[in-house]
Amino acid sequence: MPRFNDYDTIIIGAGGAGLMCAAKAGRYGAHVLVLDHNDRVGRKILISGGGRCNFTNQDAQPKAYVSKNPHFCKSALAAYRPRDFVKLVEQYRIPYYEKKLGQLFCRNSAQDIVDLLLAECEKSNVEIALSTRVMDVVKQGPHDDEGLFAITTDRGNIPLRCRKLVVATGGLSIPQIGATGFGYDLARSFGLTIVATRPALDGFVFKDDGNQNLPNGMRLSDLSGVSLDSIVSIGKTSFRENVLFTHKGLSGPAALQASLFFDPSEKRPISIDLGPDIDFCDFLLKKKRGQSKQDVKNILAEVMPKRLAEYLCETNHWHDNLSGYADKSIEKMARALKQFEIHPRGTVGYSKAEVTRGGVDCDELDGKTMAAKKVKGLYFIGEVVDVTGLLGGYNFQWAWASAHQAAQDLCQN
């Protein structure tokens, strides 16, 4: 532990948002300490993007985020844009590339982003105390030490004190790397409201873990390993990317995106267009009029994975030669291929979820500073706040932007 117990700012959480905020606040002249219960910084950064960190998205606009207050993120995202973080990446000569859809990844390793943040913190004389668990946080009264925060940790009996406290503890996603609900508990202890949390960007689990018996003994789990380009829809929201059937459910980018909008209590089905570029009705009618002698499953296998074609034919009893079907039956078949419905039991859960939806209610915070309206000197940034981005670098951009927004205010007054 550092030998001094008084700081201008203490930040709880040494992830992307916490380190970014610390570096910027220190650069503005604040005496900053970062605390984290983990034994290393940036653990979520290190595992993101398959170890290459999808550190931003060039199209990180407010429309890519969900929140009870959809306007809250606008100020931060406008003040610190993707190009601002890219400029920092380029300053450190970190090689990167665009994978698709504006997603920017490190070419080498996610460690490059962690090293960048640590270097920025070092330039700003930020102190970092790891393996340090916060036990208690109290706000001393306005007439007592000018309303300082007193923080007790498991590393000493003398509380740390600070004028301003930033909570950058993340959400509940991936507890195996140290995620906890500490930030939410701290917010509640100061009277702030929490928007109900749930795992997001984590795919779906079928009812009975995908082993429900369907006609002719076929099971959805029999499709494990099948991947295809598709459009996944939930309500009025749709995503076109690959889906991947697993032994227990549905994964792949399109499914993960849809999971952000899934609420188990609503019991809405997931609808999948199995051929976004295919007019199945026209395709099948042409085959029929061409006097094709093939069975339906063999015809469908021309435009989709064979196992999926077999599954669809078995479960829908499409067993005959296509020439035996009336045109109206073929039209009905085509609709089923465009609106293949799955009724998930839920999402995979926090162990696999990339983010946590929900968090500290944005109505409790000032969007221009990330400061709590009820508690002077208290800030919340990053995933702990009820702002959740789509898959593809959006959540890292929110981390950088919300950190930047808070840091500018930390050195005021």
Image (spheres, grey):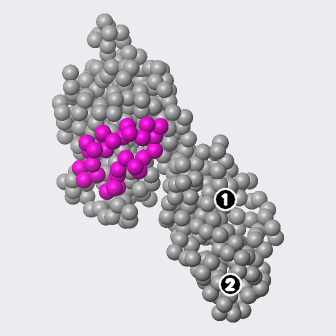
Residue 216: quarter of image = bottom right
Q: Position of residue 114 (x, y in %)?
A: 32, 48
Q: In this orientation, does residue 184 appear?
A: yes
Work out which quarter of the rendered image holds the N terminus and state it: top left
- Residue drawn where x is 38% and y is 56% of the image: 54
Question: Is 42 in the magenta?
Answer: no
Residues 404 and 390: in front is: 390
Residue 335: quarter of image = bottom right
- Judge from the rendering whether residue 306 lies leftward or rightward of residue 383; answer left or right: right
Q: Earlier in the sequence, mark 2 or mark 1?
A: 2
Q: Position of residue 381 (x, y in %)?
A: 37, 35
Q: In this orientation, does residue 108 appear?
A: no
Residues 402 and 336: in front is: 336
Magenta part of the chain: 56-84
- Residue drawn where x is 54% and y is 64% of the image: 231
Residues 233 and 19: in front is: 233
User: Which amino acid lies under the numbered mark 1 shown in the image of this protein?
Assistant: Ile
- Judge from the rendering whether residue 39 lies leftward or rightward of residue 413; answer left or right: right
* Residue tagged 1: 342
Residue 255 vertical placement versus 346 (above, below): below
Q: Dot 1 lies on which element?
A: strand
Residues 106 and 359: in front is: 359
